[in-house]
Amino acid sequence: MALSLAPLGLTISSTGQRTTTTINTSTDTALLPVGSDGLKPRFVRFAATGTCYIRMGIGAQTAVTTDVMIQVGAPLILAAMGSTHWAAIDDGVAVKVTVTPLENS
């Protein structure tokens, strides 16, 4: 079942999700997930089980504690802007980060 973000006109489907466990040093995850159509999404949703920091860009990335912060219960929707890769670093306690492509974007 897909979740609709009606005000944005975007849908979160279960396809293409990537989950990683962050560590105290930056974890580079090779690729942003693609949508069910196999294409790069314009927007991605990041959710985490604890506080961590995210960086997106083209090619391998290294996240630092001055990058965009994600907190538990406060997922972020970010524009991919041509990004291909993402990285995460936690604030001392390992967390899981789930990255979901937004359909219809």
Image (cartoon, grey):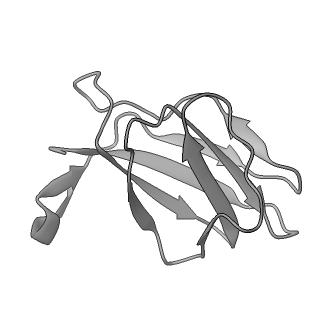
Q: Is residue 99 above or below residue 65?
A: above
In front of the other: 91 or 80: 80
In the picture, residue 20 is in which quadrant? top right
- Tell me which residue sits at (29%, 21%) in the image: 38
In the displayed structure image, the side of residue 56 where residue 22 appears, left or right: right
In front of the other: 15 or 99: 99
In the displayed structure image, the side of residue 1 where residue 30 appears, left or right: right
- Tell me which residue sits at (88%, 57%) in the image: 24
Q: Position of residue 61 (x, y in %)?
A: 68, 39
In front of the other: 14 or 37: 37
In the displayed structure image, the side of residue 76 where residue 86 appears, left or right: right
Q: Is residue 2 visible?
A: no
- Tell me which residue sits at (19%, 45%) in the image: 105
In the picture, residue 96 is in which quadrant? bottom right
Q: Position of residue 94 (x, y in %)?
A: 81, 61
Q: Position of residue 64 (x, y in %)?
A: 77, 58
